Amino acid sequence: MNRKTFILVLSIIALLSAGACYNSYLTFSILQPADTVLPASLSKISILPMPGVPSVNGSFDSLENLKPGNPYDIKMGYIRGIHSVLSESPRFSRVKLTEQSAAPFIDHTQITWEDLANVCKHDSTDAVLVLSKAVSYSANSYNPYLIYNSSNFYLLNKTRWIFYQPQTHSVSGRFNYIDTVEFGEFPAGELSDLFYQACFITGENCGRRIVPYWQDVSRIIYSGPGRDLRDAAVFVKSNKWRNAGLLWNDLISHKKTKVASNAAFNLAVAFERDDDLEQAYLWISYADSMHHSSLYSNYMKILEIRLKNRSILIRQMTGK
């Protein structure tokens, strides 16, 4: 065998080995637990468009030397950020970002129970979430101009969120958070846009600490070895999960252990996608019993964490 023939044979073997067992990726959303359990009485909420106490001199907290723009417009990023999370969470039956015209009192430092009751009446809600404090600090506050020449600038945002229920004149939750947003190299564009995005990110982070939230996760689906696993993967891409499941069910008794274990792994992913975590864990355990691998073990750990989180999520969803 000459050198060229030898290299060609090696190349063919490498291609066959690479194609003997391959996989594809899919993404779906799972519900993640928050840090706290809100009372069951919080069901329909309004979010007041008031990002903290208005600045007296119109400056942006400790960053006044940078003059990023209107502090109110920038700090509305907190409100819109938390609204994006709370409105998508299944924890509440209604989340309404109150129109400014329905809350003319937001320019004042004092809010009455009557004001909040009017907001609830206007929005058809029973509670109001108020951002009572929103203050930003530069990690380099002793020299804020470092933002222009440093790629390690950090904006530290301190916020306080309070749930009010005007019908009972009660506070149903008070949360103080400190969130740090890291900036990379100073980008081109308006400084106000940069700070707005930082406030929006903090609002999102605060929302994820208050209520269960959706998070996209990536999972592997084995599309080999063998034609049947490949065909099942095609069904998955076409969102024909039942067809794929029928093929995987037939393959779990395959004479080749690798094919059977990969089919069982795929069934675990399918059941997790349907949020049937118990069945998913049974299938990944079965796959691992046939053919142990680090990928199977890691997926088992993921499902174990999700199963432990389920009881937490139930409490957070019901408030009990």
Image (cartoon, rainbow, N blue to C red):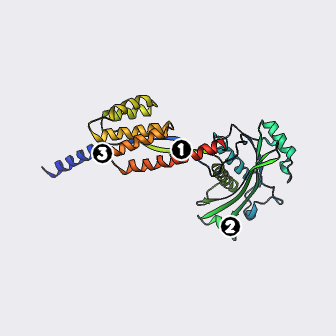
Label 2–label 3 contact, CB within 8 A: no
Mark 2 surroundings: few (<14), some (14-19) or many (≥20) residues within 10 A = some
Of callouts 3 and 1, the N-terminal one: 3
Amino acid residing under circle 2: Tyr
Of callouts 2 and 1, the N-terminal one: 2
Quarter holding residue 62: bottom right
Mark 3 surroundings: few (<14), some (14-19) or many (≥20) residues within 10 A = few
Residue beneath label 3, please?
Answer: 18
- Residue, x 61% and y 57% (percent of image)? 187
Quarter holding residue 18: top left
Closer to the eye: label 3 or 1: 1
Residue beneath label 2, please?
Answer: 145
CA gap between label 2 and label 1 equals 37 Å
Given the current orientation, which residue lies at the most extreme left position? 1
Relative image position of residue 90 (x, y in whole percent): 63, 39
| Secondary structure state at the residue bearing disc 1 | strand
CA gap between label 2 and label 3 equals 53 Å
Residue 70 shows in the view: no
The disc placed on residue 216 is 1
Relative image position of residue 92 (x, y in whole percent): 68, 40
| Secondary structure state at the residue bearing disc 3 | helix
Mark 1 surroundings: few (<14), some (14-19) or many (≥20) residues within 10 A = few
In the rendered image, which quarter contains the C terminus? top right
Image position of 78 with respect to 100: above or below: below
Amino acid residing under circle 1: Asp
Q: In screen coordinates, is 247 left or right of 106?
A: left
Relative image position of residue 216 (x, y in whole percent): 53, 44
Label 2–label 1 contact, CB within 8 A: no
Q: Nearer the viewer, residue 201 or 172?
A: 172
| Secondary structure state at the residue bearing disc 2 | helix
Q: Nearer the viewer, residue 104 or 299?
A: 299
